[in-house]
Image (spheres, grey):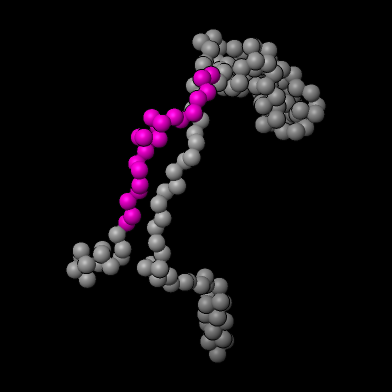
Amino acid sequence: MKKFILLAVAATVMVSCSLPTKLVNSSSYSRTSVVQPIAALFVDLDVSPEKITYFMMPSKSVIDAGYDNVVNTAVREALLANGKADVMVALETQVKYNSEGVIESITITGYPAKYVNFRNAGDDYLKSMPAKTSQPESNSGLLSKFGK
């Protein structure tokens, strides 16, 4: 009798924990065309051929904000000190921790780069895009192809 009650309780728990399923009639959904971009902006990246190295001993407030903040601060200061570049390409970081696990210093290396040649996409880019995306066939058309 106890086995029967345990089985009934287990079955009830399994049924009550199952996820509900919802059947959807796929014929009620229609595919829409892809939204074409209205405007785009292109830019080139002018990367310096010289690799720079920057050493920093971050302040307590920078360290308290976390590892990512220490790296971002070091990159920002390195870019400002080396010609006010926009981004660092091929960034490498070396972090030194003290015995308590707190960051003491960071050394970053990489190639400074600037964004140059900002331009609109222009007519050439828009002409290369398809004029209209093709609509998929309806489900009834697909079913007739397969003989159902």
* Residue at 33% from the left image edge and 55% from the top image edge: 135
Q: Nearer the viewer, residue 45 or 1?
A: 45
Return the x and y of residue 86 as percentages of the image width and height.
61, 21
Whether residue 52 is visible here, answered yes or no, is yes
Q: Looking at the rendering, in which quadrant would you find the N terminus?
A: bottom right
State which region is magenta: 116-136
Query: Which residue is drawn at the image coordinates 67% and 31% (left, top)?
Result: 68
Could you tell me which residue is drawn at 50 percent across and 36 percent down? 39
> Quick check: can you spot residue 96?
no
Specify whether 75 is left or right of 128.
right
Q: Quadrant of the C terminus?
A: bottom left
Question: Looking at the image, which residue sits at the far left?
Answer: 147
The image quadrant that residue 6 belongs to is bottom right
* Viewer-proximal residue among 19 and 133: 133
Residue at the outermost top position: 50
Based on the displayed image, in which of its 4 quarters is residue 97 positioned? top right
Residues 22 and 4: in front is: 22
Is residue 93 rendered to the left or right of residue 98?
A: left
Residue 130 horizontal/vertical position (percent):
34, 41
**In this figure, what is the number of numbered marks?**
0
